Amino acid sequence: MSYEAIKNEVKACMFDQYGTVVDMQGGLTQVVTPFLRNKGWKGDPDAFVTWWRRTHFENSMIDALLHKDHTPYREIGHRAVAHVMDRAKIKYTMDEVRYLVGEIEKLKPFPEVPEALDRLRSRYKLVVLSNGDPDMLETAKQYHRVPFDRVISVAEANSFKPHVATYQGRGPHWAEA
């Protein structure tokens, strides 16, 4: 298929929210830096965030592979942050864990994203397909301020990306995309 044929047939562009639209690594590093300093932890905050994100990713992949009942993104996030703090020997409360995971909803887009998406919006519908929970994605809209035509959570498919169920388009929002 030629470039022109693709241009004429494609009607929507779909993006991941965390790490593609919003700066997850940079934004969370900004959040954890003062938190970890107040805890007396001397490690690298960027490495802490990488550890957190990797643990979260590994647990979501296990969840997708098992393909049992979907575990909410937020719940896996709580487990990941608690696990990383345990491994780093940082004392914490569950309220602190919830606070850190809740900051994901407040992340800002990469600087170039709004303008790039505005250019695409003139020709295509813009859609997010995210591992995030529906309520997290809804709250995030007020912080990233990127107007998408549709925001779809993998919770509709009962599985995390990249499980095939997330791309088969059977949830209620898929028909609208």
Image (tube, rainbow, N blue to C red):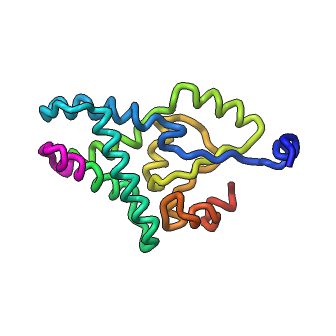
Please report the residue visible at 39 percent of the width from the left and 60 percent of the height from the top: 72
Q: Residue at x 58, y 31 (%)?
A: 113
Q: Quadrant of the C terminus?
A: bottom right
Above or below, 105 against 78 in this view is: above
Which residue shows up at 64% across the image and 65% down it?
A: 168
Q: Is residue 127 toward the left or the right of residue 32 in the image?
A: right
Residue 62 highlighted magenta (yes or no): no
Left or right of 121, for residue 171: left
Looking at this view, is 126 or 86 the one in front? 86
Up-down relation of residue 29 to residue 52 (above or below): above
At 51% from the left and 30% from the top, the residue drawn is 110
Residue extending farthest to the bottom is: 68
Occupied quadrant, residue 125? top right
* Residue 132: percent from left, percent from top: 46, 52
Front-most of 54 and 105?
54
> What segment is highlighted magenta in the picture?
82-95
- Along the viewing direction, whichever of 76 and 142 lies nearer the viewer: 76
Residue 62, quarter of picture: bottom left
